[in-house]
Image (cartoon, helix red, strand yellow):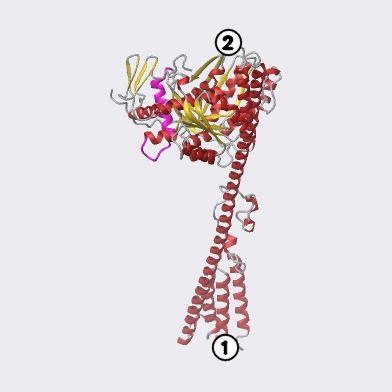
Amino acid sequence: MPMTLSPSALKASALLIVEDDRALLDALRPALGDVADLVLAAGSVHEAVAALAAHEAEVVILDLGLPDIAGADACREVRARTAAPILVLTARDSGEEKVRLLDAGADDYVTKPFATDELLARVRALVRRSRGTPAGARVLSTITDGDLVLDLEEGTAERAGQPIKLTRIELAILRTLASQPGRTFTHRQIFDAVWARPYGNPSQYLRVYMTHLRQKLEQVPATPRLLITDPGVGYRLELPVRRGDE
Amino acid sequence: MTSDATPTSSSRAAPGDASPAASPLIAPRDASLARPPWQFPPVAGWVFWGATFALGWVLLIAVRDQIEQVHAVLGFLLVVLGAAATGTRRLAFAAAVAGALAINYSFEEPYGTLFVHKVLDALIIVGFLAVALLASQLVSAARRRAEEARQRAREVELLAAERIRLIEEVEHARALQEAARAKDALLASVSHDLRTPLTTIITLAEQGRMRGEASGQGIEREARRLSHLVENVLEFSRIAAGAWPARLEATAAEEVLGSVERDVRHRLANHVLVVRVNGDDPLLSGWLDEALAVRVLSNLVENAIKYSPEGSTIRLEAAPEGEELVFSVSDEGPGIAKEDQQRVFEPFVRAQSVAPDVGGVGLGLAIARALAELQQGTLTVESRPGAGTRMLLRVRRAVLDDATGEHPLAS
């Protein structure tokens, strides 16, 4: 498994934190030094845009309660200026809000109040993910979980040597999720990637397919370990955690 | 502004009736509305004009020697026109025929017979009949057109009133929606303003703890407790303000249970959680808002963890029951006394039997029940002291249509 980068190797070259609350910024700054060589700070979307013009950030942490532009619009604005992963700090724990953020270009979100460890883990995951995806880098093609072997390139799966039959759409869903393991894709994003047609209720189709996939791939479908539902938001593929990796 | 205050009170169809389903778009034609005030009801018309005709006839006979035949003809024509203007067409026709017969009988010689003596007399009668029928036709046609115009004016008026009512309803709905949005935005900003300093406190406390400061852990724990209270109060306000929209979708029970399990797994400590979908149908589903359902059930499992002894089993299950999908969380805790079973769902109330050090403000179950109701479901409790507690979330059953129509790829 190529997932054994040690935490210290996962330092972003530059991290931009967009946060207007001075106290929180000062409190977070020392910890952020653990995940980035250079920590840039901006107090508004406008300052963030200026900072992104001057420096190339490898990851952006974006608080949503900014004074100039609010909510998902702030996210859209930053996304237009950088391809770097965006981690949003939100004070609202609602699925709808998360869908809005992910659809607006955010890569992940943390709900306040959060533990510093959780924030840092998310930042590292984003850096790892964004380094893993560019062209030429490894593409996740095989997933093994216990006695399950899933070959996404070949489109085959087997459990304990017994082949599992996957349909074309099931494979397309798996490939979409596997393109960025750990990232939650909204229903709409998966639907757009898998079904190239503009009709139908994405959630309904998707739920049925995900149910089939869980039946086929999960050891206990009611308590999935690979195909994770983010309630009201979407789905993600979680790679089996090897002991000591967490 | 409420829709009861619409200016439709002038119309008969709509006043006080605010619901669009109950009031038809156009009020039904009402017989009394179709008849203008100068018009007789049918029977009264026959009686009145019958009497007038008879009276006129008698009077004309009385003065027959002093008048000319043409005066009698004009007299009867007047009666026919009167009948046409105020009665039915049949009445006008009857008056014309009766008039012609009366002229023939009483005003053409020889009197007292229907025998027509001269060609000129026949012409007079035919002429009278023709003029009377034509005039009554014209009068009743004009009357019909006037009535139609009246009816149409009334329909236009009703339509206009209906339109105004609909517009006001739409505006009312929009105002409500905007109010909900405004409340939601306000609560979001309050939430942000409260959670941001809490995050700072927790972050600093964590750093203190890591440096080995004794107070760090306490500050961190209390800050988290405070944050939990803030969250509960905000959620409760959001529900109370009607600013929490539920989006109901057909969702598989299995998916909900999986998310709940994931949510509570790290809080289980020494409890055993058994997750099970009853009925062996992986597509067993209900109409629910996935995020809300998961929140309700996670809350119930957390309660079960809090109130049942370590090492005991908590069961998280879903089963079909008629038209309903029933999620249940059962624990082996002390149970809730009968008299407390309704009260536990009230805000700021905790069962008497509960140890005071459990924490929280007693909003958890009130919020859970409100969230169940937002999903058109119910949240109830079944419990006996000493025999554990079973919380039941019921929602309407749904059918997740397995119309995928896809066959597995040949491998």
Amino acid carrying mark 1 in the image: Glu
| Label disc, if present, on residue B68 of the rendered structure | 1
Discs 2, 1: same chain: yes
Instruction: Give the alpha-carbon distance from disc 2 to disc 1, as whole Å.
Output: 123 Å
- Is B296 within the magenta? no
Q: Chain of mark 2?
A: B
Relative horizontal placement of residue B238, taking residue B248 as reference (left or right): right
Relative horizontal placement of residue A14, taking residue B343 as reference (left or right): left
Secondary structure type for disc 2? loop
Q: Residue at x 61, y 78 (%)?
A: B56
Q: Chain of mark 1?
A: B
Q: Which residue is mark 2?
A: B311
Q: Which residues fall within the magenta stretch?
A: A195-219
**Above or below, B67 relative to A81:** below
Secondary structure type for disc 1? loop
The reply to whether the C-beta atoms of the residues labelled 2 and 1 are less than 8 Å apart is no
Disc 2: CA contacts within 10 A as few (<14), some (14-19) or many (>=20) = few
Front residue of A150 and B369: A150
* Residue B282: % across, % down: 44, 24
Amino acid carrying mark 2 in the image: Gly
Front residue of A227 and B54: A227
- Is A213 within the magenta? yes
Q: Confirm whether residue A242 shows in the render.
A: yes
* Residue A99: % across, % down: 49, 35
Front residue of A76 and B159: A76
Quadrant of the rendered image containing residue B219: top right
Name the dominant secondary structure of the magenta segment. helix
* Residue B32: % across, % down: 60, 61
* Residue B143: % across, % down: 54, 70
| Label disc, if present, on residue B110 of the rendered structure | none
